[in-house]
Image (tube, helix red, strand yellow):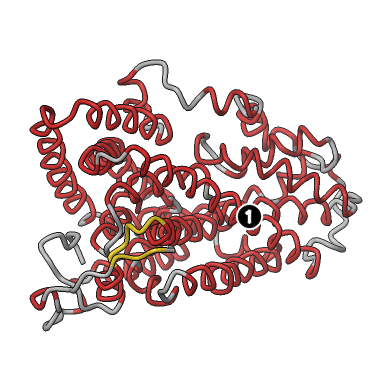
């Protein structure tokens, strides 16, 4: 894999530190802790704070579409090399398929080795099918492979932006960028204008992020208030195995990938700690998407690479989602004493490899995808999903964290693979020595 080494300017070295309480990650971490306390001791009040988290996530989602559009269009149009765009896309898809397959297999192995559901002896006929009725109905809509790829093309140009469909927005952005590249120098003023718009949009992101502690507080208070810490106890073994598997995947698998690409996974985790805490507080990996893209560009990844890899990764590179899919599926088979041999498990992985690509495009994410998968395989009872319905949010948080880390690592790896990475700037950023006018607001 190639690399571009450019000297980091002397003025890009941080000499002073801000007070710790002004750091976003400190504020969000404090808000999460307060949310847990509030939800535990005042559950009714905690539940009533749900709008705080919802509003924050809506604020972030409203800015995602224009940020992706401006970043992708300017990144591709300013480079003008359409072959490079094609190479980035192909390399990204190859990387995504390898990593998501590994994630599915690691989840499968972990559950077979530990078997947290064995001995529960739950009779699925005694479960309430109405508890997952809405999920099952959602799973029946548009989960086919053909439907999924057809859905990439929006019905109207503005429809993709109105509905916030990331893959559709990426499709439109790439088409528009290619058109601008083919038009040549005469459209350069428009390309420059789009770049200015992107800078303004990232300013809006900075303003929105000032409300991140409030959003994290409300979301966490609601989660603990509604489900309670005690709700974790019956399924604590499964949740513990899931989080341990996520840690192993990040440290071992992504750590090895990062080392091959020339950087430390631990330094990268420290670099994006604010984004990870936002994901933890809101249970949404999309909440950190705009800032993650900004930080990756600031750390030396090419704009066109970041613009293609990160948005597409939120549909095709859901490592954490893949882990929680196999974790939940095998756990339910064990809990209901459903026999699932080696071949049946491989079939499950093969189907999930396809259906997991739609997890980001439906409400309920991996839960809906799993319902659709179980319904199509006719092995594990779909009604058994009611067993984990109450703790799904806690599982979803872990998956969202791994998704965010995985897409950040993917952008750096593909950038280095493509020769679109400033390695000196990357190491300066990861070591905490980089500061310039592009520093994300709120850090």
Q: Looking at this view, name the residue that lies furthest to the bottom.
A: 15
- The picture quadrant where one finds residue 54 is top left
Q: Please, what secondary structure does the residue beneath circle 1 have?
A: helix
* Left/right of residue 33 with respect to residue 149 in the rendered view: left
Query: Which quadrant is home to the C terminus?
Result: bottom left
In the image, residue 64 sits, relative to residue 306, either above or below, namely: above
Residue in the foreground of this view, choosing between 291 and 388: 291
Q: Quadrant of residue 236?
A: bottom right
Q: Position of residue 280 (x, y in %)?
A: 43, 60
Q: Nearer the viewer, residue 105 or 332?
A: 105
Q: Residue at x 26, y 55 (%)?
A: 294
Measured from the top left, where is residue 30 in percent x and y?
32, 70
Q: Which residue is mark 1?
A: 324
**The N terminus, quarter of image:** bottom left
Identified at 43% across, 56% down, the residue is: 414
Query: Can you see residue 56?
Result: yes
Badge count:
1
Instruction: Find residue 281 and report its horizontal and vertical position in percent.
Output: 40, 59
> As displayed, is residue 123 above or below residue 416?
above
Instruction: Please tell me in which quadrant of the rendered image residue 265 appears.
Output: bottom left
Image height check: is 287 above or below 110? above
Rendered location of residue 231, percent (x, y): 62, 60
Left or right of residue 80: residue 318: right
- Residue closer to the observer: 367 or 361: 361
Residue displayed at 70% across by 53% down = 326
Residue displayed at 17% across by 73% down:
8
Residue 221 makes an appearance in the image = no
Q: How busy is the neighbourhood of tag 1: few (under 14 within 10 Å), some, or many (20 plus)?
A: many
């Amino acid at each position: 894999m190639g690399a571009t080494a450019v000297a980091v300017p002397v003025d890009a070295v941080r000499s002073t530190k801000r007070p710790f309480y002004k750091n976003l990650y400190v504020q969000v971490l404090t808000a999460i802790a307060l949310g847990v306390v509030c939800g535990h001791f005042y559950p009714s009040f905690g539940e009533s704070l749900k709008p705080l988290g919802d509003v924050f996530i809506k604020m972030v989602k409203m800015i995602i579409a224009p940020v992706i559009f401006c970043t992708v269009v300017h990144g591709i149009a300013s480079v003008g090399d359409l072959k490079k765009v094609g190479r980035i896309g192909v390399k990204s898809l190859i990387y995504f398929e390898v990593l998501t397959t590994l994630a599915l297999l690691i989840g499968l192995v972990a559950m077979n080795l530990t078997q947290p559901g064995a001995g529960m002896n739950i009779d699925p006929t005694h479960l309430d099918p109405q508890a997952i009725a809405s999920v099952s109905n959602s799973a029946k809509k548009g989960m086919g492979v053909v439907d999924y790829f057809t859905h990439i093309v929006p019905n109207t140009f503005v429809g993709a932006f109105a509905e916030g469909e990331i893959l559709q927005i990426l499709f439109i952005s790439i088409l528009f960028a290619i058109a601008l590249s083919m038009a040549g120098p005469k459209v350069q003023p428009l390309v420059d204008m789009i770049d200015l718009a992107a800078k303004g949009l990232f300013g809006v992101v900075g303003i929105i992020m000032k409300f991140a502690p409030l959003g994290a507080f409300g979301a966490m208070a609601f989660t603990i208030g509604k489900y309670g810490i005690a709700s974790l106890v019956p399924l604590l073994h499964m949740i513990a195995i899931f989080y341990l598997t996520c840690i192993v995947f990040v440290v071992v698998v992504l750590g090895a990938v990062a080392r091959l690409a020339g950087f430390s996974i631990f330094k990268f985790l420290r670099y994006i700690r604010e984004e990870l805490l936002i994901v933890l507080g809101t249970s949404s990996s999309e909440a950190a998407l705009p800032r993650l893209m900004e930080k990756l560009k600031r750390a030396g990844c090419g704009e066109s690479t970041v613009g293609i890899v990160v948005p597409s990764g939120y549909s095709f590179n859901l490592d954490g989602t893949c882990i929680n899919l196999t974790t939940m599926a095998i756990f339910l088979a064990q809990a209901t004493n459903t026999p699932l041999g080696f071949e049946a498990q491989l079939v499950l992985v093969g189907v999930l490899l396809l259906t997991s690509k739609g997890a980001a495009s439906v409400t309920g994410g991996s839960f809906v995808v799993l319902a659709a998968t179980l319904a199509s395989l006719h092995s594990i009872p779909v009604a058994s999903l009611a067993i984990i319905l109450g703790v799904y949010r806690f599982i979803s948080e872990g998956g969202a964290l791994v998704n965010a880390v995985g897409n950040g690592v993917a952008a750096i790896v593909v950038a280095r693979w493509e020769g679109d990475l400033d390695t000196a700037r990357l190491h300066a950023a990861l070591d905490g020595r980089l500061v310039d006018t592009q520093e994300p607001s709120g850090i």
